[in-house]
Image (cartoon, rainbow, N blue to C red):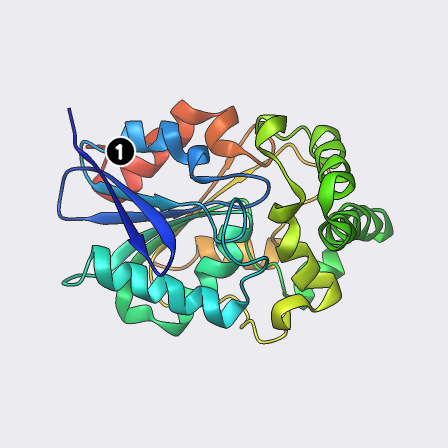
Amino acid sequence: MTTEQRITINGTEVWLQGQGDEVILMLHGWPDTRALWDGTVTALQDSATCARLTLPGFESGPSATGLEDMCQLLRQIVDRISPERPVTLMLHDWGCVFGYEFAMRYPERVARVVAVDVGDHNSSALLREWGLKEKLSVMGYQVWLALAWQIGGSLGTRMTRAMARWLRCPTEPERITHKMNYPYAMQWLGTAGGFKGAAQIKLPMPLLFVYGERKPFMFHSSKWLEKVAATPGCVVQGLPCGHWVMVSRPEAFHARVREWLWGGA
């Protein structure tokens, strides 16, 4: 059995489970919590210390956390849980957006990155690859969620749960609330400063990028994918599933992660 420790850093609870000097910090996206990584922690905790949190505001805390404040919080967390060596980031969805920015701002604190299903989200190459149908689809669900966040209350939560059902989210509906939508409000309404200050995705450390192949549109451009695949130390892996790869294809995902991190150990 491995021990479980909970610490609070600047109002955010961080769960630590596992053994080993390497620390893997896991960041989820919408409409999830740290529970998204339950199976991944089980799969990896024999070889590393797994750290995870629920993004501030998704359950409690400030109504929205801007990009600068999120990066500062992640710096505080990393400095606390792994003061002597850089961490491995494991990212999904909006966790990719925040995690990429943190890794580019503080490359000395990140050894490598495992990113799931969101790549060069803010690139012109991705925008060019989306056709009119894809652009309208993305705008439709994201603006809906941004407005649900702004409306708030029970109506905002009902709107959010309806969209989650439509998108076939695996998260239990009772866990989903409008509070989880603030990244969409940042994207479309400029809430908490928005994402105008986010850098283009050029990670200076090794990257394993895993994505679902069965989606109506991708969250990465083919140009970016080819560049990552051609970069020494980096790997791309598509799996026959949708957006929540670690839930839909857990065995394949965890096996690929272990192989990349530790040579299949």
The single residue placed furthest to the bottom in the displayed view is: 197
**Pick the front one: 78 or 90:** 78
Residue at coordinates 46% horizontally, 34% vertically from top-left?
36
Is there any visible trace of residue 103 in the rendered image? Answer: no
**Pick the front one: 115 or 51:** 51
Which residue was labeled with disc 1? 44
The single residue placed furthest to the front in the displayed view is: 153
Count the numbered circles shown: 1
Quadrant of res 264: top left
Residue 152 location (% of width, % of height): 73, 48
Quadrant of res 182: bottom right
Residue at coordinates 22% horizontally, 60% vertically from top-left?
80
Is there any visible trace of residue 1 in the rendered image? Answer: yes
In-image side of 16 versus 141 (left or right):
left
- At label 1, the amino acid type is Leu
In-image side of 20 versus 142 (left or right):
left
Residue 242 location (% of width, % of height): 61, 32
Picture layout, residue 261 above or below residue 143:
above
Residue 227 location (% of width, % of height): 50, 60
Assign the N terminus to one quadrant of the image. top left
Label 1 crowd bin: few (<14), some (14–19), many (20+), radius 10 Å: many
Residue at coordinates 56% horizontally, 28% vertically from top-left?
240
Assign the C terminus to one quadrant of the image. top left
